[in-house]
C-alpha cells in the first residue's frame, strides 16, 4: 500500500493505494487542491519508493520551490529516488519530432527507459498538457512503461474542465482504480473546499464527499459540525468535554442546584485523521427551535441518553423525530453504563422505534476511550454515508 | 447593480459604464497600443479592485504602467505567468502571484480564486477599505498567448469557467486578442464568451476603435488616444 499522505483519506481507502493502481486527482478549476498529489509524492518518497514525476507545464526548479511553499517547509526532492521529466524535456521532444505520432513515440520511449533504468515504482503525472497533446487514451499509453514485472502505480493530476463526464470516462473506459474529485463550494467566493471519493475499484462504498482544510502544509479532512443532542442530564456536556482537545461549555446552576447547559457546548477534536467541530446543544424542549437550525449543514448526530432512565426515552424519541427525514447519520450513545440498572439495546430500540440502520453504543461519557470510540464509529459512518 | 465607468465618454454617458458581469473582448492587431486601451479599462476607480493576468509582460512592467497612470497599487493584483520561468524561487504575496508558465491553467485558476478570496476577506489592500461587495475589474493581457500554448477547446472551457466565477462576484472582464493571428473559427468561438467587442485598427499611425454590443453605441470607427490611463475619443 502507498499512503496518500492524508490520514483521513487513507482510512477511507482502506489503508491507502494498492501498488499498481491508477489514481486520478481531478481538480475543479480554481480549487487549491494541488497539495493532494504533492502529499502523495512526499509520502511515496518518504517510503523510499522510486518515483518518476512528469511535469510538462513547469521546470524542476520551479516545481521544487512550489512544493516547499505548499508544504510550508523544506522537503527532500533531490533524493536519489526521484526522476523528473519537465517542461524543458517537453520542448526538446516537440522540437526534435515532426509529428504528433513521433512525439508520442518519443515520450513513450523516454518514460520506458527511465522506468526500466530506475526501476520506477510510482509515476506522478501532471496530465493537462499530455491530455491536450495526445488525449486520454494516447496520454495513458505513453505513461505505461511496458516493461516486464509489476506495473508502476500511476497517480495523475488533471484539471477537469469537462465535469462529471470526464470522471465517468476515467472509471468506465480507462479503468482507474481511484477517482477523487477536488472541489469547492462557492458562495460567491470559495466557501469551503471538499473532496469527493467518486470511485474505488476494490470497494462498493457509495460516492461521498468530505470537506478539507490545509493546515501547516497538510491536508486534513474536516467535519465542520457534529451535533451532540439528547434529553437533559444525559451527559452531553461531559461527552463533549471528554472528547475535545479544546472547547468550552456554557453552564448555569439549574433549578435543582446542579449545572445545566444554557447555551451550547463547543469542542474541537483532532484525531482519526480529521478535524472535527462538536456542538453540544441543550436538551430542554424550549431549545428545540435551536436544534432544528443546528441540524442544517450537520454531518452527523450523536443522540445521548441516560441508559439508566427509561422515562427519559420519551424525550429522546421526540428528538429523533427532529432529525428524521434530514438524511444525517445518527448514532445513539447510551450513557452511564458505570451505574446500575441500565437498559438493554433491545429495550432502547423498542422505546425509540429505531431499526438497525442506527447503531447503539454503550459508554460512560466520563471515560475518554469510550467517547473516542463512539466518535470514531460516527466518523466511519459519516465517511460511508451517501449524503 | 454596479456600473463600471470606462472613461470613454460615449459609453459612460450612454449607459453609465459597463454593467457588472460584462465581458469585453478587445480585438486588435499587433502594435496598435491595444494593451494601453485594455489597461485603461482595467484601471480601478476609487474603491474598486483590479486583477491582471499577465501572459506576456513581467508583473513589474504592468505594475509600472498602472503606477504611472495614477492607480493606487494597493488595489491592483497581478498574476504573472512569465517571471517564474526565469526566476523559479520567486514567492507569492497577496497582490503578486506567479504561475510557472502560460500553459499552467491549473495554477492560473487557483491564483485567481485566491486573489478574489483575499479581496472579499478585506486582506488585499493593506487595511485601506474598498467598496463592498468589491467591484473587480479583471484583465487578461493576452488570450493570444494562452492560445499559443493550449488547445482552443481547452481554453474555451477554461475561460468559460473563469468568466462564470467573475460573474458570480459581479466583476467585469477585459480580454485582449490579436485579430491577425487566428482563424475565424477561433475568433468566433472566443467572441461567444463576450458581451461586448471593441475592435481596434491603426491607419497612418492613428488608432481607431469600433464598439459592438452596447446598445446605442456608434457602429463607426472612431479615432482615439490613451494617455495616463485615460481614453479620449478624438474628433
Image (cartoon, coloured by chain):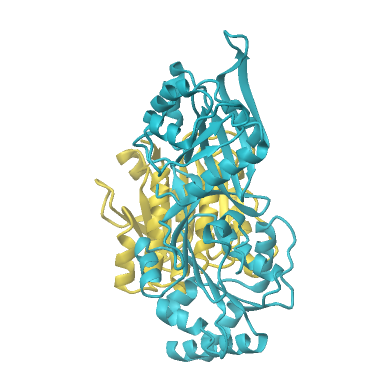
Asked whether residue B71 appears in the rendered view, the answer is no
The answer to whether residue B188 is above or below residue A212 is below
* Occupied quadrant, residue B59: bottom right
Q: Nearer the viewer, residue A70 or A45?
A: A45
Residue A17: give x, y in percent of width and height. 56, 68
Q: Residue at x 53, y 86 (%)?
A: A107
Q: Residue at x 43, y 82 (%)?
A: A138
Residue B131: give x, y in percent of width and height. 50, 34
- A68 displayed left or right of A139: right
Residue B184: give x, y in percent of width and height. 30, 72
Q: Residue at x 60, y 69 (%)?
A: A1
Q: Nearer the viewer, residue B182 or A258?
A: A258
Name chain A's colour: cyan
Q: Nearer the viewer, residue B86 or A105?
A: A105
The answer to whether residue A175 is above or below residue A361 is below
Q: Residue furthest front?
A: A341
Residue A21: give x, y in percent of width and height. 52, 73
Asked whether residue B162 appears in the rendered view, the answer is yes
- A132 displayed left or right of A225: left
- A58 displayed left or right of A193: right
Name chain B's colour: yellow
Disc tally is: 0
Q: Nearer the viewer, residue B60 or A125?
A: A125
Amino acid at each position: 500500500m502507498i499512503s496518500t499522505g492524508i490520514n483521513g483519506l487513507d482510512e477511507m481507502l482502506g489503508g491507502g493505494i494498492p501498488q499498481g493502481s491508477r489514481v486520478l486527482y481531478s481538480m475543479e478549476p480554481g480549487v487549491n487542491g494541488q497539495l493532494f498529489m504533492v502529499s502523495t509524492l512526499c509520502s511515496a518518497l518518504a517510503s523510499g519508493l522510486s518515483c518518476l514525476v512528469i511535469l510538462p507545464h513547469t521546470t524542476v526548479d520551479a516545481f521544487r520551490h512550489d512544493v516547499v511553499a505548499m508544504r510550508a517547509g523544506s522537503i527532500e526532492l533531490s533524493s536519489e529516488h526521484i526522476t523528473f521529466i519537465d517542461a524543458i524535456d517537453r520542448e526538446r521532444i516537440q522540437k526534435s519530432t515532426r509529428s504528433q505520432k513521433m512525439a508520442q513515440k518519443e515520450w513513450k520511449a523516454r518514460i520506458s527507459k527511465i522506468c526500466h533504468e530506475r526501476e520506477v515504482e510510482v509515476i506522478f503525472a501532471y496530465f493537462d498538457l499530455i491530455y491536450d497533446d495526445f488525449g486520454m487514451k494516447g496520454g495513458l499509453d505513453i505513461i505505461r512503461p511496458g516493461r516486464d514485472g509489476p506495473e508502476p502505480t500511476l497517480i495523475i493530476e488533471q484539471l477537469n474542465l469537462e465535469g462529471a463526464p470526464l470522471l465517468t470516462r476515467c472509471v468506465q473506459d480507462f479503468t482507474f482504480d481511484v477517482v477523487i474529485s477536488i472541489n469547492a463550494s462557492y458562495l460567491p467566493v470559495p466557501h469551503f473546499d471538499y473532496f469527493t471519493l467518486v470511485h474505488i475499484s476494490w470497494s462498493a462504498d457509495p460516492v461521498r464527499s468530505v470537506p478539507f482544510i490545509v493546515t501547516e502544509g497538510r491536508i486534513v479532512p474536516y467535519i465542520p459540525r457534529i451535533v451532540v443532542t439528547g434529553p437533559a442530564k444525559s451527559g452531553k456536556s461531559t461527552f463533549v468535554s471528554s472528547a475535545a482537545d479544546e472547547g468550552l461549555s456554557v453552564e448555569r446552576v439549574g433549578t435543582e442546584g446542579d449545572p445545566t447547559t444554557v447555551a451550547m457546548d463547543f469542542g474541537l477534536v483532532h484525531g482519526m485523521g480529521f478535524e472535527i467541530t462538536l456542538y453540544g446543544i441543550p436538551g430542554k424542549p424550549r431549545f428545540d427551535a435551536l436544534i432544528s437550525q443546528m441540524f442544517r449543514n450537520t454531518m452527523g448526530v450523536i443522540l445521548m441518553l441516560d441508559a439508566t432512565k427509561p422515562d427519559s426515552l420519551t424525550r429522546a424519541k421526540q428528538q429523533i423525530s427532529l432529525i428524521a427525514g434530514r438524511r444525517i447519520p445518527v448514532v445513539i450513545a447510551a450513557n452511564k453504563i458505570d451505574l446500575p440498572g441500565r437498559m438493554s439495546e433491545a429495550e432502547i430500540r423498542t422505546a425509540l422505534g429505531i431499526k438497525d440502520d442506527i447503531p447503539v453504543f454503550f459508554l460512560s461519557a466520563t471515560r475518554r476511550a469510550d467517547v473516542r470510540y463512539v466518535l470514531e464509529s460516527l466518523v466511519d459512518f459519516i465517511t460511508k454515508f451517501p449524503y | 447593480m454596479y456600473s463600471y465607468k470606462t472613461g470613454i465618454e460615449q459609453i459612460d454617458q450612454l449607459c453609465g459604464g459597463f454593467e457588472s458581469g460584462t465581458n469585453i473582448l478587445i480585438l486588435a492587431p499587433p502594435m496598435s497600443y491595444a494593451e494601453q486601451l485594455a489597461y485603461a479599462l482595467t484601471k480601478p476607480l476609487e474603491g474598486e479592485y483590479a486583477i491582471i493576468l499577465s501572459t506576456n509582460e513581467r508583473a513589474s512592467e504592468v505594475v509600472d504602467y498602472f503606477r504611472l497612470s495614477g492607480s493606487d497599487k494597493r488595489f491592483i493584483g497581478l498574476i504573472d505567468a512569465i517571471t517564474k520561468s526565469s526566476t523559479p524561487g520567486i514567492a507569492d504575496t497577496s497582490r503578486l502571484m506567479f504561475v510557472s508558465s502560460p500553459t499552467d491553467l491549473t495554477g492560473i485558476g487557483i491564483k485567481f480564486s485566491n486573489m478574489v478570496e483575499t479581496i472579499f476577506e478585506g486582506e488585499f489592500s493593506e487595511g485601506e477599505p474598498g467598496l463592498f461587495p468589491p467591484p473587480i475589474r479583471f484583465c487578461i493581457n493576452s488570450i493570444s498567448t494562452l492560445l499559443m500554448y493550449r488547445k482552443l477547446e481547452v481554453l474555451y472551457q477554461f475561460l468559460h469557467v473563469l468568466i462564470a466565477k467573475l460573474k458570480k462576484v459581479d466583476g467585469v472582464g477585459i480580454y485582449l486578442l490579436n485579430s491577425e493571428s487566428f482563424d475565424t473559427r477561433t475568433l468566433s468561438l472566443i467572441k461567444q464568451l463576450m458581451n461586448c467587442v471593441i475592435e481596434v485598427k491603426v491607419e497612418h499611425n492613428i488608432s481607431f476603435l469600433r464598439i459592438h454590443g452596447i446598445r446605442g453605441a456608434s457602429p463607426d470607427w472612431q479615432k482615439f488616444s490613451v494617455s495616463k490611463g485615460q481614453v479620449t475619443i478624438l474628433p
